[in-house]
Image: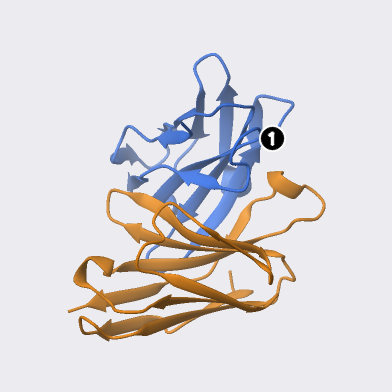
Chain colours: A orange, B blue
Amino acid sequence: DADVTQTPRNRITKTGKRIMLECSQTKGHDRMYWYRQDPGLGLRLIYYSFDVKDINKGEISDGYSVSRQAQAKFSLSLESAIPNQTALYFCATSDLAAGGDANEQFFGPGTRLTVL
Amino acid sequence: AQSVAQPEDQVNVAEGNPLTVKCTYSVSGNPYLFWYVQYPNRGLQFLLKYITGDNLVKGSYGFEAEFNKSQTSFHLKKPSALVSDSALYFCAVRDSLYNFNKFYFGSGTKLNVKP
C-alpha cells in the first residue's frame, strides 16, 4: 500500500551494529505495528502502538525497541543486530475509528534485513 | 490460546479450475477473520474479512471465503483460478474477547496456478 512507506527497503549489516527501520503512513491511522516474516512462520508481531503515548510488546520483542515519534511515524531499532534477526520486516497500520477492532491492517512494502 | 493454522504449505491448481486455500483458527471469543495476499517483493494486501452476519464473504479479485463456526474454519475460495492469482496467502484472526489488540497470522500458503 503506497500510503505506508518503509525505509530502507533493503539493508545488509554486520553483527553488533545498531539498525533503525523507519515507517511512515499518510492514512491518518492511530494504530501501527511492526512484524517480522520468516519462511514457514508467517508474520510475528514485534511491537504495536495505539497512539504516540502507547507502546506495547508483541510476541517477539526481545532484541528490539521502538519509537512512536508522531502519529504518522513508527520506528523499529535493533540495538545490537544478530544473524537470527535476518528477516523481512513489515510495518502495518489500522484504523481505530469506524469498525474499530474489526478493521483490517494496511501493510508497507517491507524491509529486507540481512545481518552477517 | 489464539492461533491460526494453514495446513497446506502449497496449493497447485490449473487455470480455470476452482481453488481452495484452507484456514482453521482457535480463539476464546468470537473471531474476526481476515485473508491477505502477498505478491513477490510486496507487502500484504487485504482481500476480505468476516466479522459477523452472512457466513459467505465476498472480497477482492473474485475471491470469497466461507466461515464455518462448528469447524472453526475460514477457507478461501475462487470459482475459476487465474495465473495472476499465484501468490502467498495468509489467514489472520483477531479475538474479540481476549488480546483483541493483536492479529494472529497463519504460516502462509503458496498458491501456484498453472496455465
Image point (23%, 77%), residue name: A115
- The answer for which chain carries disc 1 is B
* Residue A19 figure quarter: bottom left
- Residue A16: x %, y % from top left: 23, 82
Q: Nearer the viewer, residue B58 or A56?
A: A56
Q: Above or below — where is B115 with respect to A116? A: above
* Residue A88 figure quarter: bottom left
* Residue A112 figure quarter: bottom left
Quadrant showing the C terminus of chain A: bottom left
Instruction: Kindly tell me whether residue B78 is visible in this rendering.
Output: no
Quadrant showing the N terminus of chain A: bottom right
- Residue B86: x %, y % from top left: 38, 51
Left or right: A68 in relation to B23: right
Which residue sits furthest right?
Answer: A98
Which residue sits furthest top?
Answer: B70
- Residue A59: x %, y % from top left: 43, 51
Q: Amino acid at mark 1?
A: Ile
Circle 1: element type: loop
- Residue B43: x %, y % from top left: 47, 64
Image point (48%, 52%), residue name: B37
Left or right: A41 in relation to A57: left
Q: Above or below — where is A83 with respect to B112? A: below
Q: Which residue is mark 1?
A: B51
Q: Nearer the viewer, residue B12 or B10?
A: B10
Q: Badge 1: how crowded within 10 Å, few (<14), some, or many (20+)?
A: some
Q: Above or below — where is B101 with respect to B28? A: below
Image point (28%, 48%), residue name: A40
Q: Above or below — where is B1 with respect to A49? A: above
Number of numbered discs visible in the structure rendering: 1
